[in-house]
Amino acid sequence: MIFNDHTDHQNIPRDLRKDATTKTMQLNHETYQKINWSKVKVENKLAKAGMLVNTNLPVIHNQDSLISVWDLRRYSFLFNNYIPYTVNPKLWTQGNLNLNTGLFKITDNIYQVRGFDLANMTFVKGSTGWIVIDCLTTKETAKAALQLVHDYFGEMPISAVIITHSHTDHYGGILGVLDDAKEDARIYAPMNFIHSVLQENGNAGVAMTRRGVYMYGTVLPRDEKGQIDDGIGKSVSIGNVTFTNNIYEINAEHVEQDVDGIAMEFQLALHTEAPSEMFIYIPGERSLCIAELCNATLHNFYTLRGAEVRDPVAWAASIQKAIDLWGIKLTSVFGVHNWPRFGNEAAIDYLEKQRDLYQYINDQTLRLINKGYTIDEVGRMVKLPESLKGEWYNSEFYGTVNHNAKAVYQKYIGWYNGNPVDLNKLLPEESAKKYVEYMGGEERVLEKANQDYMKGEYQWVAEVTKQIIYANPSNREAKVLCADALEQLGYVAESGPWRNVYLTGAQELRYGILPARGSIITNDVLNHLPLADVLYLLSIRIEGLNAGRLNYKMNFVIPDREDVASTELKRGIFRYLNNELAEDAAVTVTMPKEVLYELAATNENPDPSKIKIEGDIHKWNTFLSLLDTFDQNFNIMTPVPKK
């Protein structure tokens, strides 16, 4: 995810964006005609149910700089009494549903703040204070949500915090919550939470952040031709991501726990929507927090920002386990995105149909795999039956059947489609030049591509103009035509992330890359990670071939962490050894933690005056010279330069 966006959206030229073509208008009109408005009416009622405070379009500022980290005023255009042809009508409608913001009552003792970030923050009344479930993405939005609750109920301390899973939009605001917490407040999280935070968000953090710009539409304008919604919420806030390691992890599959006088049951749901995730059942309220396994949309087995493929069988089985444990008792079920369900019958129907949605995609993809179909084919061949597709909450606002089926293929079979022609394909730049040559040259390809664009064959036009762009990145006409095709694909996309990806690609082809800075691995996060995990961020930057002949040890001393480590550089690998200093180390370096974090999380070498070096300084300088640099704004629409 991308959390610190300093792009000036208002300075993006908008006159190059096109209107919807006749073909796009026709497709969106057909979508509109098929909408079951009785289902929308139900969702609208649920999205507004229990509203105690309507915050309309909240704006949240960074207290130090007065920069807005969250501003829903940019979505006011969604209140227009018409649906523009440049937006899929279902996505437009979901975008409106996600603008129901404020403080909501779920039960007599459970309340929820929605619309202050991508996720929700839930409050359960304990004996001595509030039990908070999830903390939003950033410190600023978490504090604002907390203040809304204080303003309505009066000041009350935080007695406990529960984090449902290891995605940043659920833990990143933790320090904003802990500012109001009691000294003995305990923080609960599922098994392997801390490990999962680094593994999923940190090791490939630069690439995930860059791809997150596409998935979340970070640098897109918010308007009828821009970013509309992400299905599970509007977007992610852009404030300060925080963390703590003072966490009590739930390590048994099912745990009954007294939390500030409230009986709760924790049920692990590992390797589902997140590698570390759990449900919370509150018997006194007969209410279930289903974490992020059920939402008012189809979710992702594979997220477009990049992550390990999720296990849809474990996902479905975990929902079934919740039904088995508490189904007969339930009167409400709420998640960490979108809105709750009320009544036993409605709650069970919702849980069962979301369960079957994920199991169905898994099983039907496996059926097609065993018939010999490839990854691209299964994505287009798996179709939902009306018994699942007919529910609004099973719509493709976030994940899609197409890319989820491909994820199932990847999980079971891998990237190779079985055809030896595709085993070791040419690099895109190499094959593109040949394709363009075989097709008669750039001018001939563009001539035919323009004709196909007029026919509404947008996917093909995008594919064929990509060949020209990769063969000749300076061909402006090819970039413009590819952008036009991607834009129309975005206008008809039901999925918010698909729309964002298409439109961001079009924007970059027209204007170039609009830099978005920031990282989910902030100093607050690094401060609470084990030193071994911090140093591993250096390991993945080592240029292995150049380091392959080296073999020596280095000690690290970080006084303000009260931490030391011995490491070795050997056979092209930088490896953490242990938390003791090695007597045979070639060099020992002492530095404050801020310098270490700068070294681990940025491309710049730290100020040498802040580092004390004992031993062979040449070996330390050699180590620094081997650290590769990562461009946070690397090319996506054009080739990444090869060394």
Image (cartoon, rainbow, N blue to C red):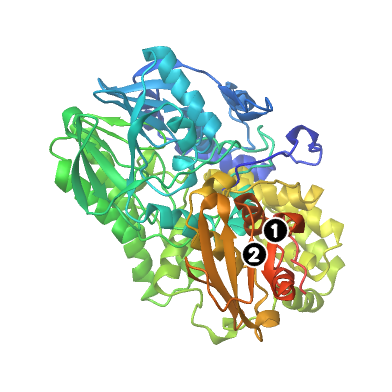
Q: Which residue is mark 1?
A: 611
Query: Looking at the image, is 419 positioned above or below residue 595?
Result: below
Q: Residue 54 in the image: x percent, y percent?
A: 46, 16
The 10 Å Cα crowd at callout 1, few under 14, some 14 to 19, many 20 or more, is some
Q: Which mark is residue 410?
A: none
Q: Which mark is residue 589?
A: 2
Query: Looking at the image, is 639 positioned above or below residue 7?
Result: below
Element carrying mark 1 = loop
Q: Along the polypeptide, which appears first: circle 2 or circle 1?
A: 2
* Location of the C terminus (image quadrant): bottom right
49 displayed left or right of 6: left
427, 383: nearer the viewer: 427
C-alpha distance separating marks 2 and 1: 7 Å
Q: Is residue 457 visible?
A: no
| Tag 2 near tag 1, CB within 8 Å | yes
Query: Looking at the image, is 615 positioned above or below residue 558?
Result: below
160 displayed left or right of 417: left
420 displayed left or right of 353: right
Q: Residue 543 in the image: x percent, y percent?
A: 68, 75
Instruction: Give me the residue at 51% from left, 57% from top.
Output: 563
Instruction: Give me the residue at 69% from left, 61% from top.
Output: 612
